[in-house]
């Protein structure tokens, strides 16, 4: 067991929002938080616009790929954060699960990279708050 807090970010495909949250937390927390991401039904690859929006902040997702939830990991993390209502995670004993309903600009007719920047910035605000909670 580590004395560092650990978090698992989960979305359905693990190609967009959960990868964004993990990348943003890694940038913010450095080695102060153990960060993982996974999907309930992992897709074939990362969302190119998600990758591009993070690259604008100097976050590189090279080497990342969609992955399923690891049941062993699930039992050891301090917190699971689901992004969006579609991602459902079976609770593990002693593991807290919270949900972030993230902004969906496409519902307002905003698409493409502008949509992804808004999603990224919404997730970043959640990540900043979570980091503060985990480290104080």
Image (spheres, rainbow, N blue to C red):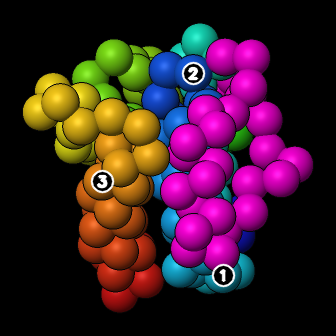
Q: Quadrant of the N terminus?
A: bottom right
Mark 1 secondary-structure assignment: helix
Q: Could you say where residue 49 lies in the image, as x and y percent from the top left?
A: 56, 42
Which mark is first along the chain, 3 or 2? 2
Up/down of 77 relative to 70, above or below: below
Residue sitting at x 42%, y 37%: 112
Q: Nearer the viewer, residue 76 or 8?
A: 8
Main SS, magenta residues: loop
Q: CA distance from mark 2 to mark 3?
A: 19 Å
Mark before the other along the chain sequence, 2 or 1: 2
Find residue 31 and report its horizontal and vertical position in percent.
70, 80
Inspect this view and state whether residue 26 appears: no
Identify the mark at residue 30; answer none if there is no mark. 1
Say which residue appears at 64% left-offset and 64% top-offset: 55
Element type at mark 2? loop
Mark 2 — residue? 13
Can you name the residue that lies furthest to the right here? 63
Res 124 label = none
* Residue 68 shown in magenta: yes
Q: Is residue 11 left or right of residue 2?
A: left
Q: Nearer the viewer, residue 3 or 84?
A: 84
Q: Residues within 10 Å of mark 3 (few under 14, many from 20)?
A: some
Residue 108 magenta: no
Above or below residue 24? Residue 131 is below
Residue farthest to the top, as pictured: 41
The residue range painted magenta reads: 43-71
Which residue has dot 3 on it?
Answer: 118
Q: Tell me the element at label 3.
A: helix
Residue in the foreground of this view, choosing between 47 and 86: 47
Indicate which disc, 1 or 3, sits on the residue closer to the N terminus: 1
């Amino acid at each position: 067991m580590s004395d560092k807090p650990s978090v698992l970010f989960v979305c359905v495909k693990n190609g967009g929002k959960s990868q964004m949250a993990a990348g943003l937390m890694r940038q913010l927390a450095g080695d102060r938080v153990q960060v993982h991401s996974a999907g309930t039904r992992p897709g074939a690859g990362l969302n190119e616009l998600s990758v591009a929006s993070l690259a604008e902040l100097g976050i590189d997702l090279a080497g990342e790929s969609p992955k399923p939830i690891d049941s062993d990991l699930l039992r050891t993390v301090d917190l699971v954060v689901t992004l969006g209502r579609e991602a459902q995670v079976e609770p593990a004993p002693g593991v807290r699960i919270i949900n972030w309903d993230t902004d969906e600009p496409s519902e307002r007719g905003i698409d493409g990279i502008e949509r992804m920047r808004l999603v990224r910035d919404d997730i970043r605000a959640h990540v900043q708050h979570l980091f503060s909670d985990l480290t104080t």
